[in-house]
Amino acid sequence: MAERKIDQDVMALIADILEMEPGKIDPNAHLVEDLGMDSMMALEILAGIEKRFKIKVPEQDLPMITSVNRAIELTKKYVK
Amino acid sequence: MSSKSIATVLDFEQIKGIIPQRFPFLMIDRVIEAVAGERVVAIKNLTGNEWFYQGHFPKRAVTPGAMIGEAVAQTGIVFFSLTQPKLRDVTFLLGAIKMRFRRPAWPGDQLRIEVTPIRLTATAAMLNGVVSVGDQEIARGEFALAAKPNSEL
């Protein structure tokens, strides 16, 4: 899968869950401290990424989802 | 269908031992299938005496979608509790619910509520819920449930 497509899809997915415009999210902003993500939103993001990319991300990687860019990195780690 | 033809995995009293809701908010009557980590199926028999029909609506009893969502969430709590049986002293909170309703549920309907996992962690779950009456699916959706320690509330 094209890397840029992964970037866009992860951003869109996170923006949808956070109910924000994708263009208004700084990809390096901290999802909890800056954007108000809670633990259930993190799980929704994880489940959304797994469903969208048909991958399985181990639960211990959940704390890595601290920013859009970290979520993109994590996704790319598991997308073949 | 007589009630005796339906297998009972958890009866009403046993359900009360798992979920904290009570009248008038207990929205499942019986659990008929339960496989920890895989699936829970519950039923709710709607009668014309349900408290919410007084106001929803005075001239035509229609089951509120919110109460169908509550039945799904309560089935989700049963699922989560059976899957993570070591959890103690927690309150279950709904983080998100997205449901589509295909047709109303009326007094006399028996709701069959099936919950399966999308993603589980030790303290939270994303779940699928499908509600049917007879052979007809009347609602489906996804929801996120978290078990929060009471000390953190």
Image (spheres, coloured by chain):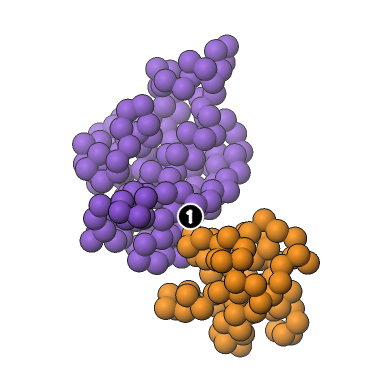
Chain colours: A orange, B purple
Residue at position x 71%, y 72% from top? A26
User: Is A72 placed left or right of B93 in the picture?
Assistant: right
Quarter of the figure with residue B13: top left
Residue at position x 61%, y 38% from top? B102
In the picture as drawn, the residue positioned furthest to the right comes out as A23
Give x and y (percent) for residue B32: 31, 45
**As rendered, which of B138 and A45 lies closer to the eye?**
A45
- B41 vs B126: above or below: above
Q: Can the viewer see residue A50?
A: no
Amino acid residing under circle 1: Ala
* Disc 1 element: strand
User: Is A20 placed left or right of B28 in the picture?
Assistant: right
Give x and y (percent) for residue A16: 67, 59
Residue at position x 29%, y 61% from top? B84
Q: Which chain carries label 1?
A: B
Quarter of the figure with residue B56: top right
**As rendered, which of B102 and A33 lies closer to the eye?**
A33
Q: Mark 1 — residue? A: B144
